[in-house]
Amino acid sequence: MNKPNRKQDALDYHAKGRPGKIQVVPTKPTNSQRDLTMAYSPGVAEPCLRIADNTDDVYKYTAKGNLVAVISNGTAVLGLGNIGPEASKPVMEGKGLLFKIYADIDVFDLELNAKSVDDFVNIVKALEPTFGGVNLEDISAPTCFEIERRLKAEMNIPVMHDDQHGTAIISGAALMNACEIQGKKLDKIKMVVNGAGAAAISCSKMYLSLGVKKENLVMFDINGVLTPDRTDLDEIRLEFATDRKDIKTLADAMKGADVFVGLSAGNVVTPDMLKAMAKNPVVFAMANPEPEINYDLAVAARKDIIMATGRSDFPNQVNNVLGFPYIFRGALDVRATAINEEMKIAAVHAIAEMAKKPVPEEVNLAYNLTNLKFGRDYIIPKPMDQRLITEVSAAVARAAIDSGVARSVITDWDAYAEELRNRLGGTDKLLRNLTSKAKQNSKKVVFAEADTYKILRAAQIVKDDGIAQPILLGNIDKIKKIIRDNDLDLDDVQIIDPREGKCERFEEYAQYLYKKRQRRGVTLLEARKMITDRNYYGACMVQFGEADALISGLTKNYATTIKPALQIIGIEDGVNRVAGMYLMITPKGPVFFGDTTVNVDPTVEELVDITVLIERTVRQFSVDPRIAVLSYSNFGSNDGDVPEKSRKAVKILHQKYPQMVVDGDMQANFALNADLLADNFPFSTLNGKPANTLIFPNLESGNIAYKLLQELGGAEAVGPILLGMKKPVHVLQLGSSVREIVNMVTIAVVDAQEKEKAATQTSSKRR
């Protein structure tokens, strides 16, 4: 796309539909006249009076505690310079957008026609009753230093100039990790900083706080090296002046330097300058949009370099969005009176440590990468990593409490972490709980389609996370090549190719299959051939205890995958049929759908069996099932084969399983809307809470419903979860994502744990 088109696209993006990027959205009901009288007059008087009696109640009855002002005078906007307050507004709106989507913080952007320190400070100070925090943005130096200093001293809410401290915090974390990888100690490195603006000064102060020695730091501005004899420097910049007489130019300073930090202009560093640096150099070329040296030029000049830029199209982007949303989130949540140095340092360490942890697959997918891990090309987390809100916000909140600037103290940190996840629409609490359960007693899981990248990537994730111990089936050379090409860490994982016929228990498996199927037309020769099929071989591994669960189905249809498991393992004792269930992760919580994959048009008795099977499984997920047997009818309001079948099934369930919370026939909206159900059918056994388990009268309705909810409702579908097998076998959707595979492995491990527990209990009873 050419530049004129890009420019027009940007203009269209901001102008199309409702102009701008943000709007105010009510958080309370406004549907009735009563709602409006509560929201405004006369009901609003009550919270006003409470706040008048106790000012701190403003946090209880208003949005102050989650409201940040993004404030600028437009004197130093991005790379655009002094363009004025009106022209800065799109940037400030964008900053507000980032606050919201990354940390669920509401923002009012304020563009001030105030260039003097006094005018600016007086306006912002007068706004303190409105806001929980102030983010200063795009204010020119040196004015920004004095504005921030005075506001921090004269206000009792958190104030931070993100252009200074955001870059300092993120690059500080990057510096710590880069030096660790390169084998350099912070108190020994020689550093060159090119740029002496607000960001460069703040970054340099941060580096000193982390251990860099001032005598080892040389700083340049547009007029050259900062020295004590220069008469054009203010006190802030004089603090970084050097007495070294051997340095006249940037090239001089780069000789033997360990670290270069650029916060200046593009293309001021040459490959020869990099070649003159010390062994294993660290280069942060953070000028935007053009770095101080092109990324490709830099890595071509030095193979031992660690390179970071401010751009998203290169590795190691120093992006302030890694910091400011979460720093303010932590500060707001403890009602901090300031954002102090302790809180900033805590953010640095939290960000640095996060980069060393295994990367969620959704982050790899977002950046079109395959195996992102701590190293030269990954020294700080990616902005799309949703763990930032829990890791960084909690670290900042702790530091605020420990340093004495918090007015509210957090005592339950697990609950706080859950609250933070929920702010991002986190509705996967159930999956997190299942993951935690799986990790407590991981199981051996055999992957029947291990010659695909997705399966191998999922295998590495569950191995690294301690969820499962993978066993890989497939062409050994092909699997090893995929592992090698994608730098996966699976060298110590067992790989088996059943086609070779040389596997340790191959003949034993073949004999077992032959005995089970000899009266169904299967000869021993055919049994041996069938065992070379990975689904048959994997099922035998589970049957013989070589593995605890089987995962398959990524590249084959459902029937092809399930048939070998049914023939080898069979269905559970006391169960009449297998069934398929999906766990739907929705904004309102988890909902279980069944049957969605196996039984096409179940009879009344089969519908009862399916419901019993699903009810038991839902309980294994530590959820109390509230079951609705669905139809197009509500409690006999319509006749027909489907309503009649649903009604009869419910009648049997009520008679045989009186402890089960189940009702029907009913329509889906009544099942999921407790108020609607109570108003119209007060006799229903489901009254009080909505259903969380939906039994569909046939496969087509269940299958259509879960796919519609997945696509239109944005729900995450986990499944199909195969129910009723004697041992755990779980079938993937064709073309599942890595995340979906990991979810299914987690389900399989928990299933294996439950079956193991049930077998132990049965054995104890027999004794």
Image (cartoon, rainbow, N blue to C red):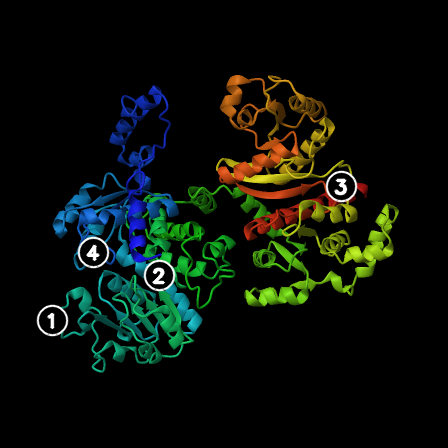
| 403 left or right of 529 in image | left
**What residue type is disc 2 on?**
Arg
Q: On the rendered image, what quadrant is the N terminus found in?
A: bottom left
Please tell me which of labels 4 and 3 falls first in the chain.
Answer: 4
Please tell me which of labels 2 and 4 falls first in the chain.
Answer: 4
State the CA–CA distance, disc 3 to disc 2.
Answer: 56 Å
For disc 1, the neighbor class at 10 Å (few under 14, some 14 to 19, many from 20) is few
**What residue type is disc 4 on?**
Ala
Q: Which callout, 1 or 3, points to the residue nearer the camera?
A: 3
Q: Which callout, 2 or 4, points to the residue nearer the camera?
A: 2
User: Would residue 223 be seen by someone viewing this image from the given angle?
Assistant: yes
**What residue type is disc 3 on?**
Glu
Picture quadrant of residue 101: top left
Q: On the rendered image, what quadrant is the C terminus found in?
A: top right
Please tell me which of labels 2 and 1 falls first in the chain.
Answer: 1
Q: Is residue 137 above or below residue 679?
A: below
| 339 left or right of 745 in image | left
The image position of residue 461, as x and y in percent, is 56, 57
Give me the residue at 37% from left, 55% from top. 322
State the CA–CA distance, disc 1 to disc 3.
Answer: 87 Å
The mark found on residue 231 in the picture is 1
Name the residue beneath numbered marker 3: 572
- Disc 1, SS: loop
The mark found on residue 311 in the picture is 2
- Disc 4, SS: loop
Name the residue beneath numbered marker 4: 76
Q: Toward the viewer: 533 or 234?
A: 533
Please tell me which of labels 1 and 4 falls first in the chain.
Answer: 4
The mark found on residue 488 in the picture is none
